[in-house]
Image: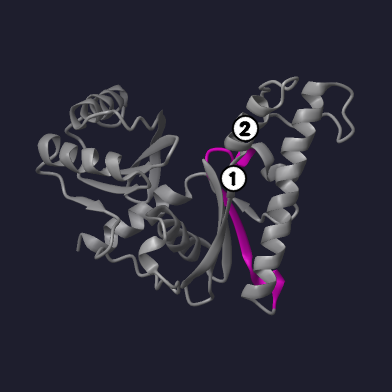
């Protein structure tokens, strides 16, 4: 069993693989104050509750992390609680098989490289990955599987929080599909602006990236992933595939490349 861990700024997603099959998954909040011992308690509790394995039932660990302080604690937790389990942390020097065509390759988040690897493996190239997390990121993968660049926009939750804090008569709402674009009350108006607004943003950015990436737009696969993708992906005209576990799949591939 392989445990894959994707630490984002707001949430941490964990998945358990039996060979190539994702058989279990969890989502917990990313708390930068959590120590290595606390992470061990969280992880042991999740594994112990699984009907498929226990805390001692994993054969490998793969991690990508967007929060340096959490990565430090995770590394310490692996050493102390899982010292006999092979662990791969996606960082400079780890083989991903993805050439990075950027001015400074070290600036690219490890999760974005892992997503590019998974997209190329699952769907071939060229492709564009839209990842809906704390930020909404867009990543372009060439036909050769190269990471060639991307774009970063404020995420859905960040935008909604900012709107409710700065708008005196606006409030937080559950983000679900609105009944119509032309809303009849404030709650529906917020939902309309958020859902259709972000869908329009995705389509606009993806269209521009696809035109720069390939002379054959129909040959580019657009993949949506991330915890908030389900909020708007159904309203996007450019998205071809919704793969919620893209990053975990990429982590499995990285582990396989580095554990031989």
Residue 144 falls left or right of residue 153: left
Reply yes or no: does residue 226 show up in magenta: yes
Residue 37: horizontal and vertical position, in percent?
18, 27
The residues colored magenta run: 216-230
Residue 242 seen in the figure: yes
Mark 2 falls on what kind of element?
helix
Residue 223 falls left or right of residue 208: left
Q: CA distance from mark 2 to mark 1?
A: 10 Å
Numbered label tally: 2
Residue 56: horizontal and vertical position, in percent?
16, 33
Residue 67: horizontal and vertical position, in percent?
35, 43
Image quadrant in which you'd find residue 105: bottom left
In front of the other: 40 or 55: 40
The disc label shown at residue 216, or none: none
Residue 200: horizontal and vertical position, in percent?
75, 50
Reply yes or no: does residue 20 show up in magenta: no
The residue to which callout 1 is attached is 154
The disc label shown at residue 162, or none: 2
| Figure check: 126 above or below 53 | below
Residue 139 seen in the figure: no
Residue sitting at 66 percent across and 22 percent down? 172
Residue sitting at 77 percent across and 36 percent down? 193
């Amino acid at each position: 069993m392989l445990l894959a861990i994707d630490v984002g700024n707001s949430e941490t997603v964990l998945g358990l693989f039996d060979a190539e099959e994702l058989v279990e998954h969890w989502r917990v909040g990313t708390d930068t104050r959590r120590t290595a011992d606390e992470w061990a308690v969280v992880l042991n509790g999740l594994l112990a509750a699984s009907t498929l394995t226990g805390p001692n039932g994993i054969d490998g660990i793969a991690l990508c992390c967007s929060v340096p302080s959490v990565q430090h604690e995770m590394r310490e937790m692996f050493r102390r609680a899982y010292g006999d389990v092979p662990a791969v942390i996606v960082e400079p020097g780890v083989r991903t098989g993805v050439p990075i065509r950027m001015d400074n390759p070290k600036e690219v988040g490890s999760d974005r490289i892992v997503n590019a690897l998974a997209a190329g493996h699952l769907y071939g190239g060229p492709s564009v990955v839209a990842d809906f997390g704390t930020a909404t990121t867009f990543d372009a993968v060439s036909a050769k599987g190269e990471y060639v660049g991307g774009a970063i926009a404020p995420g859905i939750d960040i935008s909604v929080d900012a709107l409710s804090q700065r708008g005196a008569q606006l409030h937080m709402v559950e983000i679900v599909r609105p009944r119509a674009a032309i809303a009849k009350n404030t709650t529906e108006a917020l939902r309309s602006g958020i859902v259709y607004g972000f869908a329009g943003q995705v389509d606009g950015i993806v269209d521009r990236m696809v035109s720069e990436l390939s002379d054959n737009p129909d040959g580019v696969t657009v993949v949506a992933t991330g915890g908030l993708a389900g909020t708007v992906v159904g309203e996007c005209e450019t998205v071809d595939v919704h793969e919620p576990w893209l990053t975990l799949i990429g982590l499995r591939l990285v582990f396989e490349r580095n554990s031989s």
